Image (cartoon, grey):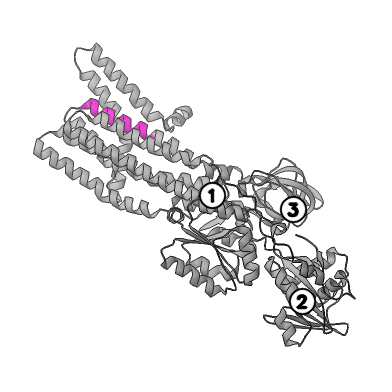
């Protein structure tokens, strides 16, 4: 009994039973002298295949929706009433088998979501009272130590507190290369250990993991409708009743009931209704597998129209981790390490981001920095004045030297200018009214930045702008490395907002890429806001129009290219659906297309539309064909001979 129930719940059970009865009816008609037995079996085939269709039509009518099921139900019942039993059985059988095929293939378009859910781990090994205990992944407590062994799935989000190893993060970032993990690195639930052994402190469990947020986001996005889909829904709302009215009119005018019923069948807008959502589901699923989260159909459509991309510099085109690259010695009585040491002692009390870079460089050099300066006086827009063991130390730009009346600053200004031209932020160090040297700090440009700009152009983006609050010389140096079309420097948050608004006024569809609070107004105003490195940010995953889970800049042109392919796929599907219905209508009116043939062609068009959308699930080649090797600091103009003659220059990193 259970086996029978299980079989009946199979999506192919009804088409199989109905088809068998149709064959039996045809055989009975051949062996019996009368058609009675064959007709009864044929009606039974229609009833078995059509019962679910009639129930679905009744439910839709109850919800005040006139749908495809109603058209088929009216046509099938009408065919039985006028004695066209074969037509009734054939139409309901083909419709049922079409539904089964549709459900089977549609499930494949959601395979990306299914794969995401499949990578969610079930169990975790935690350390409790000094012993290893296996518990359900959702039962891990925050702050608890989780053990990650080679070959196992990471069950929680967390931070490595011990051990080393490599993780396959493809399920989260889309990157197939394993990533080495050491203490203090973050790990994500759903990734897989490929080597080593890690001890991880849990920071996110169950629904509070990046994987869970991605699954939730993809579910919502695949159900969110595009603008074109909303239009098509409104179109279908009047199209279906119009087909019914047309069938009635044709039936009344011609007196041909079969013709009227055939019009009902071939007028079914099944392929049209499914043409857009099936493409969106496949496109968003493909993006999710590649570590790109798109908020929904509307944002997918808008992304396909992007013509201008505005990119923040710090943390987007650059690594967002400033570090000391140069120490230019200007006082021959000192060493470069002494200049760095005085600067580090002075910055020990500062919260400025560049202070961390100087302190780190001092630590790497083995320079001991203990205690705090006696006095720390930040000078807004100019630098810092500090008192260290009775000595006054100034660290900042030429304006700071002017404010404190440091007259002999020509060499310092020249060195600072040169460093700025090379993309470094210069910091002049003055000890007791004597210019000691200039420290250069740089935020390393991401290796893929130039390739991203090139790929954006290849994807059809006509303008790529860098918007930054940094100084023009530094910004221009980064702009030269990355190859952006335009550099806007020394910008405040409202300036970035104005630039985005001006681009939109000029007719551009603008995407803004940023990761800082100062980018928030521009991100909110842009047609598409893009967040990078969203894996560790719940806010980014939930709010960004496009969230790139990893830090791979090349995912941005990939996302735009995929959006354009998806929209083209939607248009192809709409064309297939409309051409099919139009040809069938002409076929019916001109003669030659019967009710069963119409249903067969109709169902075939539905399957063609689904198969076309499934092409989006395939991985795609990189956007750009011309892969340029990005220049590095070594490719930038070398310091002039004149400068080298005036200063000892120590390069710490490049």
For marks 1 and 2, the one nearer the N-term is 2
For label 2, the residue is 412
Q: In which quarter of the image is the C terminus?
A: bottom right
Residue drawn at (52%, 66%), measured in percent from left and top?
523
For label 1, the residue is 558
Residue drawn at (21%, 47%), measured in percent from left and top?
242
Vertical comparison of 618 with 519: above or below: above
Q: Is the magenta stretch mostly helix, strand or loop?
A: helix
- For the question of whether residue 213 can be seen, the reply is no
Towards the viewer: 535 or 486: 486
On whether residue 229 falls in the magenta region, the answer is no
On whether residue 96 falls in the magenta region, the answer is yes
Q: Which label is found at residue 200?
A: 3
Q: Could you tell me how far apart the alpha carbons at marks 1 and 2 are, in whole angstroms?
A: 45 Å
Is 262 placed left or right of 252 in the picture? right
- Under tag 3, what secondary structure? strand
């Amino acid at each position: 009994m259970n086996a029978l129930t299980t079989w009946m719940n199979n999506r192919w059970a009804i088409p199989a039973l109905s088809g068998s009865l149709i064959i039996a009816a045809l055989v009975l008609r051949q062996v019996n002298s009368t058609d009675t037995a064959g007709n009864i079996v044929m009606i039974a085939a229609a009833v078995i295949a059509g019962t679910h269709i009639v129930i679905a039509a009744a439910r839709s009518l109850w919800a005040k929706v006139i749908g495809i099921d109603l058209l088929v139900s009216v046509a099938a019942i009408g065919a039985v009433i006028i004695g066209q039993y074969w037509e009734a059985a054939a139409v309901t059988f083909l419709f049922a088998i079409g539904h089964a095929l549709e459900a089977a293939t549609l499930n494949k378009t959601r395979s990306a979501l299914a794969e995401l859910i499949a990578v969610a781990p079930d169990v975790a090994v935690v350390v409790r009272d000094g012993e290893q205990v296996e518990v359900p992944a959702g039962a891990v407590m925050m702050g608890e130590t989780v053990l990650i062994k080679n070959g196992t799935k990471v069950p929680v989000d967390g931070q490595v507190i011990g051990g080393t190893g490599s993780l396959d993060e493809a399920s989260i970032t889309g990157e197939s290369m394993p990533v080495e993990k050491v203490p203090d690195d973050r790990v994500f639930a759903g990734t897989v250990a490929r080597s080593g052994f890690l001890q991880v402190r849990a920071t996110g469990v169950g629904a509070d993991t990046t994987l869970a947020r991605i699954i939730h986001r993809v579910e919502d996005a695949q159900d969110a409708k595009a603008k074109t889909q909303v239009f098509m829904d409104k179109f279908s709302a009047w199209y279906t009743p119009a087909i019914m009215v047309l069938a009635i009119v044709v039936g009344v005018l011609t007196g041909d009931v079969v013709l009227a019923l055939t019009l009902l069948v071939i007028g079914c807008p099944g392929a049209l209704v499914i043409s857009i959502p099936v493409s969106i589901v496949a496109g968003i699923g493909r993006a999710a597998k590649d570590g790109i989260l798109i908020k929904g159909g509307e944002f997918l459509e808008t992304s396909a129209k992007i013509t201008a991309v505005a990119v923040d510099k710090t943390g987007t085109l650059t690594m967002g981790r400033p570090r000391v690259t140069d120490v230019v010695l200007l006082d021959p009585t000192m060493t470069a390490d002494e200049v760095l040491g005085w600067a580090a002692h002075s910055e020990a009390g500062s919260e400025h981001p560049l202070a961390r870079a100087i302190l780190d460089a001092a630590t790497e050099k083995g320079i001991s920095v203990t205690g705090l300066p006696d006095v720390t006086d930040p000078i807004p827009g100019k630098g810092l004045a500090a008192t260290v063991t009775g000595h006054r130390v100034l660290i900042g730009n030429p304006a700071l030297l002017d404010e404190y009346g440091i007259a002999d600053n020509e060499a310092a200004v020249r060195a600072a200018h040169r460093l700025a031209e090379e993309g470094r932020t210069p910091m002049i160090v003055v000890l007791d009214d004597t210019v000691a040297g200039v420290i250069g700090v740089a935020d390393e440009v991401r290796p893929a930045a130039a390739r991203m700009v090139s790929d954006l152009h290849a994807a059809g983006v006509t303008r790529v702008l860098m918007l930054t609050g940094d100084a023009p010389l530094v910004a221009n140096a980064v702009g030269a490395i990355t190859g952006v079309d335009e550099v806007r420097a020394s910008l405040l948050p409202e300036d970035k907002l104005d630039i985005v608004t001006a681009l939109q006024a000029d007719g551009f569809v603008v995407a803004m890429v940023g990761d800082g609070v100062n980018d928030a107004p521009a991100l909110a105003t842009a047609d598409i806001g893009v967040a990078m490195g969203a894996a560790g940010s719940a806010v980014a995953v939930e709010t960004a129009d496009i969230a790139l889970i990893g830090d791979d800049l090349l995912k941005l042109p990939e996302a735009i290219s995929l959006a354009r392919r998806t929209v083209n796929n939607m248009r192809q599907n709409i064309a297939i659906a409309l051409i099919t219905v139009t040809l069938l209508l002409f076929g019916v009116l001109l003669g030659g297309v019967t009710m069963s043939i119409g249903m067969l062609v109709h169902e075939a068009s539905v399957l063609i539309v689904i198969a076309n959308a499934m092409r989006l699930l395939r991985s795609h080649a990189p956007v750009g064909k011309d892969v340029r090797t990005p220049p590095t600091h070594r490719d930038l103009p070398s310091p002039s001979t004149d400068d080298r003659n005036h200063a000892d220059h120590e390069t710490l990193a490049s």
